[in-house]
Image (tube, coloured by chain):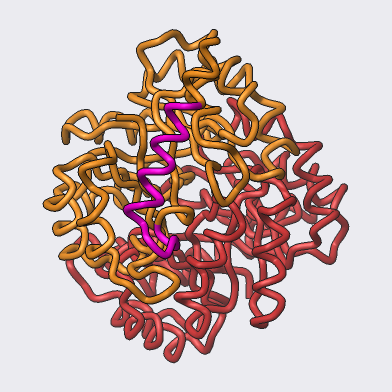
Chain colours: A orange, B red
């Protein structure tokens, strides 16, 4: 499976409950990424239910970017409710990512580092530091890296320099403009889709179509 | 007044309630910075009480670093409970900081951008992009910028290039090693102190001493 669903709010745009939607699509996705707006509500009961329905693989997407001590305190609140955590590589290792990584290792949680972002602003500063970011990633060895489907050539660059062990998770598919399958074709392991599923009139059907398009994209890619 | 108190948890290390501590020191500080670990608990009642006791100037320190739409959704939850919001400059303007700034302007809230961080890891990537970050700050014109008291020469550089309109807020004082008054001497408007106050046996006395040291630092600086 190659699809991760992203959820930023506890209900869809037309007011349906997140659990109701997830119940229909969980068997088709490999994980659930929960965004800061949802996590800020600190509804641990909801998190627990999402994890139950979807058999684990809960990704906390707080886009952590603080000093190590503060990041650890933030994750501590969710340590029994999630499986992996997204933090920014940009903040650096010393007293930053290293402290978070230690905490996650001790608690059997996985670290995922942002390597580049899906919006246009990522080109202004973030993407100018690709070489340094790749060095940090090869040094820290996180479980995964987040790279944008909107600029797939970046995925290709990272894949060639970080090897095949580290997973690449790619957002920006659907609402933000990237076609399903493109990031996979360029070397990603998973594509992350949020609004195109959660706000679809029929999320189950939307998920099926995206998975079909992923397969088509991969097929065309191999040609 | 030149001191902002930082609070990351809803109780001190020895179990005292945050409100109890704030009640004793609020008249000596110009603002209260609330960190992600506390904000994740989404206790709006606590935020409301902090704002009442301290007469406003609540700084949301989520270290926002996501695409614009997601940052706006996160801040939306607190819009009636806070006065300013800290986000990272490194995520860039387009579809990032610009969207957040628009939302904050409409809601009479102030934007504060991180320009550099207080931990050692900040030198690995963040501080290599100082010129681009200063450009973004001069373009976006946030109300304030966060710069580390632990590396005060950075404060000097920013002050010389962003002018005197934009406020400089400086963390890293106390527990992280910088002496009170140093950042002020190098051009900061406010120093941010967290653990050295909140975990002191007598927070009121600790605050008084820090303010005294700030004044001494400023006096020695002028010599």
Of residues A174 and B25, the one nearer the viewer is A174
Which residue corresponds to the image point at 63% horizontal and 39% vertical from the top-left? Answer: B151
Q: Position of residue A215 (x, y in %)?
A: 42, 27
Q: Position of residue A7 (x, y in %)?
A: 37, 56
Q: Relative to A178, does residue B44 appear above or below in the rendering?
A: below
Which residue corresponds to the image point at 29% horizontal and 48% vertical from the top-left? Answer: A75
Q: Position of residue A68 (x, y in %)?
A: 39, 40
Is residue A212 located in the magenta-colored stretch of the structure? Answer: yes
Q: Relative to B219, does residue B45 appear above or below in the rendering?
A: below
Q: Relative to A172, does residue B120 appear above or below in the rendering?
A: above
Judge left or right: residue A59 versus residue A178. left
Residue A214 can be seen, yes or no: yes
Q: Relative to A37, does residue B107 appear above or below in the rendering?
A: below
Of residues B212 and B132, the one nearer the viewer is B132
Dividing the picture into quadrants, the one containing residue B130 is top right
Dividing the picture into quadrants, the one containing residue B135 is top right
Residue A94 can be seen, yes or no: no
Which residue corresponds to the image point at 64% horizontal and 82% vertical from the top-left? Answer: B107
Dividing the picture into quadrants, the one containing residue A39 is bottom left
What are the residue bounds of the magenta stretch? A198-216
**Tag count:** 0
Which residue corresponds to the image point at 33% horizontal and 81% vertical from the top-left? Answer: B46
Q: Quadrant of the N terminus of chain A?
A: top left
Q: Quadrant of the C terminus of chain A?
A: top right
Of residues A44 and B148, the one nearer the viewer is A44
Is residue A105 located in the magenta-colored stretch of the structure? Answer: no
Q: Position of residue B183 (x, y in %)?
A: 66, 52
Judge left or right: residue B190 versus residue B47. right
Judge left or right: residue B132 versus residue B104. right
Looking at the magenta stretch, what is its main secondary structure? helix
């Amino acid at each position: 499976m190659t699809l991760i669903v992203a959820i930023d709010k506890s209900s869809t745009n037309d007011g349906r409950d997140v659990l109701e939607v997830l119940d229909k699509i969980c068997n088709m996705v490999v994980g659930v990424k929960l965004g800061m707006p949802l996590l800020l509500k600190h509804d641990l009961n909801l998190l627990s239910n999402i994890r139950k329905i979807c058999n684990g693989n809960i990704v906390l997407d707080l886009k952590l970017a603080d000093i190590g001590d503060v990041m650890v305190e933030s994750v501590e609140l969710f340590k029994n409710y999630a499986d992996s955590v997204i933090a920014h590589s940009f903040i650096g290792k010393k007293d930053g990512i290293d402290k978070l990584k230690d905490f996650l290792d001790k608690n059997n949680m996985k670290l995922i580092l942002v390597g580049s972002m899906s919006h246009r602003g990522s080109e202004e500063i973030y993407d100018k530091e690709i070489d340094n970011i790749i060095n940090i990633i090869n040094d820290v060895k996180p479980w995964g890296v987040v790279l944008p489907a909107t600029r797939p050539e970046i995925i290709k660059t990272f894949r060639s320099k970080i090897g095949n062990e580290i997973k690449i998770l790619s957002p920006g598919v659907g609402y933000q403009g990237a076609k399903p399958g493109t990031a996979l074709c360029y070397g990603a392991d998973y594509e992350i889709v949020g609004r195109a599923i959660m706000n679809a009139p029929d999320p189950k059907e939307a998920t099926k179509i995206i998975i079909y398009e992923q397969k088509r994209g991969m097929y065309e890619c191999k040609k």
